[in-house]
């Protein structure tokens, strides 16, 4: 991982000051959605390098998924007991970071209970990476360890 140098948020040949202001406004809206998710479902958030990462688990739910070049609705599998979400925002402007390869490993009492990839999920409220899964304890799942550390998803 490269050291944190701060996202490029100064006017340049890539973006004018006015365009950067628009980007920050988009990030502010995404940040409000992350905060609402945290209030509703108790998201854990941490900064890591150039990213703000939010993790939440909630009840398994139907999701929109890509099927070729269009979105389709898929109900949660009957055995799924959680929906795992990871929202990744740019630390500089707060916007959603698309195109990442996100994996999640969950352990309970030192034992690995899940190792999965989380694909991008189009969501009408909060774009995120996520999947439904079956884990021991379901919604009783709690984060182990401390915040602000860990591996950052890579593109």
Image: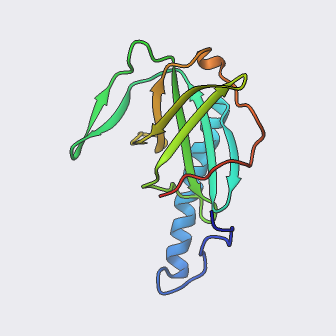
Q: Is residue 61 left or right of residue 21?
A: left
- Toward which corner of the image does residue 64 lie, by quadrant? top left
Q: Is residue 111 above or below residue 20?
A: above
Residue sitting farthest toward the bottom: 13
Q: Where the N terminus falls, by quadrant?
A: bottom right
For the point 42% across and 39% down, which residue is it? 123
Q: Is residue 43 above or below residue 87?
A: above
Where does residue 31 sit, x and y in percent of width and height?
60, 50
Q: Is residue 64 left or right of residue 52?
A: left
For the point 38% across and 30% down, which residue is it? 63
Q: How many marks?
A: 0
Colour mapping used in the image: rainbow
Is residue 60 or residue 113 the one in the foreground? 113
- Toward which corner of the image does residue 138 lie, by quadrant? top right
Is residue 20 or residue 140 the one in the foreground? 140
For the point 60% across and 43% down, which residue is it? 34
Residue sitting farthest toward the front: 111
Residue sitting farthest toward the right: 146
Q: Is residue 108 above or below residue 49?
A: above
Q: Is residue 3 above or below residue 115?
A: below
For the point 68% across and 47% down, which residue is it? 150
Where does residue 9 sit, x and y in percent of width and height?
60, 75
Where does residue 100 sit, x and y in percent of width and height?
46, 53
Where does residue 20 sit, x and y in percent of width and height?
54, 73
């Amino acid at each position: 991982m490269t050291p944190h140098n701060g996202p490029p948020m100064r006017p340049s040949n890539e973006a004018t000051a006015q365009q950067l202001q628009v980007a920050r406004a988009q990030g502010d809206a995404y940040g409000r959605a992350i905060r609402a998710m945290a209030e509703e479902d108790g998201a854990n958030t941490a900064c890591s390098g150039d990213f703000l990462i939010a993790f939440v688990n909630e009840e398994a739910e139907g999701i929109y998924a890509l099927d070729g070049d269009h979105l389709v609705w898929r109900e949660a599998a009957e055995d799924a007991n959680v929906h795992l979400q990871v929202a990744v925002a740019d630390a500089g402007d707060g916007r959603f970071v698309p195109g990442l390869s996100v994996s999640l490993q969950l352990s309970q009492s030192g034992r690995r209970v899940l190792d999965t990839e989380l694909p991008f999920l189009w969501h009408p409220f909060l774009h995120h990476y996520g999947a439904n899964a079956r884990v021991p304890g379901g919604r009783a799942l709690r984060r182990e360890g401390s915040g602000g550390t860990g591996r950052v998803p890579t593109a």
